[in-house]
Amino acid sequence: MMRTIMTSIAAVALTGCATTPAPQAPVASADAPDTMQWLYGSGEAAGASIQAWRNIADYAIARSRERRIPQSVTMGIGGEIAGPASCALGESWKPLAVVFDVDETVILNQGYEYWTTVTGNSFSKESWEKWEKTGASYVRPVPGAVTGIRRLREAGITPVFNTNREFSPEGAARAIAAAGLGEAVHRDTLFLRGDDGVNSGDKDGRRALIAERYCVVALAGDNLGDFADVFNDDARTPLERRELAARGDLAQLWGNGWFVLPNPVYGYSLKGTVEQVFPEGTRWSPETAPADAPAIMNEGN
């Protein structure tokens, strides 16, 4: 997923000077941003990722052992959410696959995040292009990914990577290999932004291309757009986006064909005003008068 975070460090103006000095980069001993401490440095993040990867492999391998023609998982195609489809191909069926996002799903871009943190630079396409082409030595695998990918391949299931990287398929393949995740072949098991003929961060078009040749039994990513583009409709408020993911039939897919990895550092998940994130009924303060007890909250409320 292409990142959208803007990391800012305030510049201090010098009295009487005509220019403003460059932002002062934090020293290496300073605390990293909270979100980066969690994702790149904490045992909790490692545990959550390993848990997700174990569940991905367990689920897909169980699906591969079913004694019937497999069906694809529900996924976003053509701007809609398409239900399961038969994977029959003549008297056989398409090869089984699990489709993964790349950044912060199978690899951690720790080298790039280090650079933005210690320099005070924000994300830019120019620096990201350089990172795509030269940063492979500075990535690390998401905890659990190496074992999870190995288990899938041993079971005859193909890992396919659907990423919003756009500048270097060779660099993406090098980063995946450098993280110990094996080979990725452009337009076969590796799809980048633009490979569907549309220069967009939307992934439905690439999912359609992948589904033409593979029986996709599971999807994994750190952003809801890794499952269906409808989640990232800009007209949808954060609460509406959350409710779409957490209610009804789609809620049944989490852990059951759809697997999300934690990423508090950047992406579509980081949206919402205070009023949007804390709707009426959740805004307590020490001065707030006690309210009537709410109705018991059932699953999905």
Image (tube, rainbow, N blue to C red):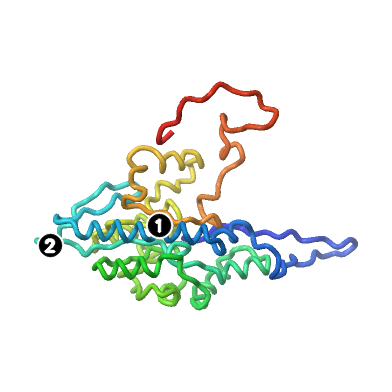
Using the rendered view, name the quadrant where residue 25 is placed: bottom right
Residue 13, image x and y in percent?
Answer: 82, 61
287 relative to 215, above or below: above
**Residue 77 visible in the snapshot:** no
Q: Quadrant of the C terminus?
A: top left
> Where is residue 173 drawn, in percent x and y?
40, 74
Q: Which residue is mark 2?
A: 92
Query: For the residue labelled by badge 2, is the local secondary structure a helix, a strand or a loop?
Result: strand
Q: Nearer the viewer, residue 229 or 153?
A: 153
Q: Residue under label 1, please give it.
A: 52
Left or right? Give the position of 256 relative to 138: left
Amino acid marked by disc 1: Ala
* Outermost right residue: 16
Q: Residues within 10 Å of mark 1 (few under 14, many from 20)?
A: many
Where 167 falls versus 284 (above or below)?
below
In the image, 73 versus 230, the foreground residue is 73
Q: Rounded to the nearest whole Å, what is the CA distance between mark 2 and mark 1?
A: 30 Å
Left or right: residue 54 compared with residue 167: left
In the image, farthest residue toward the left = 91
